[in-house]
Image (tube, rainbow, N blue to C red):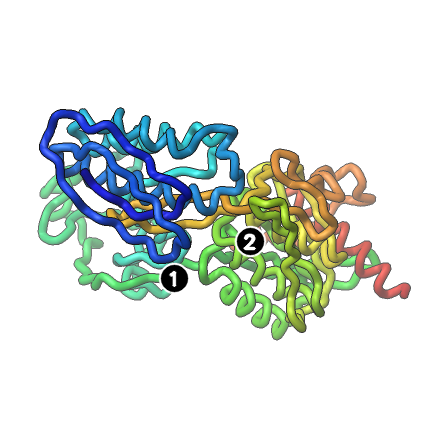
Amino acid sequence: MDCFHLSGKGVIGFAAAATALASVCYDAPAFAESLTVAFPVSRASEVNTVQRTLVEAWGLIRETFVDPTFNHQDWDLKLQQTMVEMFPLNSADVAYTKISGMLSTLGDPFTRIISPKEYQSFRIGSDGNLQGVGIFINIEPRTGHLVVLSCVKGGPAARAGIHEGDELIEINGERLDVHSAMESSRDASIREVNLPREYITLSPISSTIIPHKTRDGHLTKTGYVKLSAFSQSAAIDMANTILDMETQGVHSYILDLRNNPGGLVKAGLDVAQIWLDGDETLVNTIDRDGNMLPINMVDGHAITRDPLVVLVNEGSASASEILAGALHDNGRAILVGHKTFGKGKIQSVTELHDGSALFVTVAKYLSPALHDIDQVGIMPDVQCTTDMLNSPRDSLLKNESSTSSLEADSCILVAEHELDIQESVGTAS
């Protein structure tokens, strides 16, 4: 039998089936107490590996899960039952489904396990880094050709002069079967490029400056910043973007968090501090024992104090809601859009010994004004409707390809209207 020394208050004995037994010890020095767990070892090595993963995950949940009743069930017994179900299996994939099934009994969809391959994809998103040539491609439905969608700015493909709409004919000496040799030989525009693989940083920030005409006819500049995810680079990328816009004479900002599903909570808190001063409360957390802990800034200094509108919708979740709540409840921003998703829980992410990852809900959070967000969401101050606008907006962006798509966005129109009001109030005072 395998012996795992984990935190706990007793000993659980698992009945061993008639099979070859092994003995392995698992140490968890972070745990204050020791619990010996015995269970039958699978003869299938890949299933045995998942058994170890199960015990590792079980221990982490036992110590950190936000609900100490584990959804009013015996969590120790749940481990025993799952081990018994896993013992006769011969496939790691099926064994993983047993772990997922056990985690689902906690009643929290955000506490979950993902495979090593899935975790690598997650890390690309949260770290903001990948290795490649910096090119995004797709199959053109009509022709079946591989067409370039976009290139990562500053990446190998962009430096080589590859552009959106270019077609790929050959990769590493292998012709793509969507093209014929005769087509290629007649096309004088074909060129060969050598692209090195590099570690590429993907910025979650996209931005542009929108020319804006105020009520009194003055032409000003509004900085539009869209944040697509809270990766490790989100705060520094945003800070650099805002600093650059300040040098270009921007006088107001629109921060777009629509369809931003969240990411790293710390990144959300760091972004909030770009806009706030002093020792404001950013969010309040509630641990598994019901203790509330406010997270405050320490001597914060905002990069800009210009008027700010934040756009949110039903796709704005988790760290997006933390950021929106921090800026709104501290009186820094007006919220425009639609009610947010409503995910008021915080997860820890732990890479397990087999390369998989365990997400565990470890705390709940309330906004600085103590509003409960979980399953409720945040209601914006103003809905995205142009009914309140006094006059049609002048078309100022016809020659700006980077901002042309913003012209028809009703939320942008409403946001600019709210910025006008903020600036009017500021001038009057």
In this rendering, does residue 385 appear at all?
yes
Residue in the picture at 26% in, 57% down:
132
Residue type, numbered disc 1: Lys
Query: Up-down: is 339 above or below 403?
Result: above
Q: Which mark is residue 189?
A: none
Answer with left or right where residue 332 lies relative to residue 409: right
Q: Position of residue 163 (x, y in %)?
A: 33, 55
Answer with left or right where residue 407 lies relative to residue 259: right
Badge 2 local density, few (<14 within 10 Å), some, or many (20+)?
many
Q: Position of residue 38 (x, y in %)?
A: 25, 37
Residue type, numbered disc 2: Lys
Q: Quadrant of residue 81?
A: top left
Q: Residue furthest right?
A: 428
In this rendering, does residue 258 appear at all?
no
Residue in the picture at 55% in, 53% down:
226
Q: Nearer the viewer, residue 1 or 96?
A: 1
Instruction: Tell me the SS state at disc 1.
Output: loop
Q: Position of residue 284 (x, y in %)?
A: 65, 52
Q: Which mark is residue 226?
A: 2
Q: Position of residue 139 (x, y in %)?
A: 28, 38
Residue in the picture at 76% in, 51% down:
418
Instruction: Tell me the SS state at disc 2.
Output: strand
Q: Earlier in the sequence, mark 1 or mark 2?
A: 1
Answer with left or right where residue 340 lies relative to residue 229: right
Calculate the distance from the C-alpha at mark 1 to the C-alpha at mark 2.
17 Å
> In which quadrant of the rendered image does the C terminus lie?
bottom right
Q: Badge 1 is on which residue?
A: 153
Query: Up-down: is 427 above or below 345?
Result: below
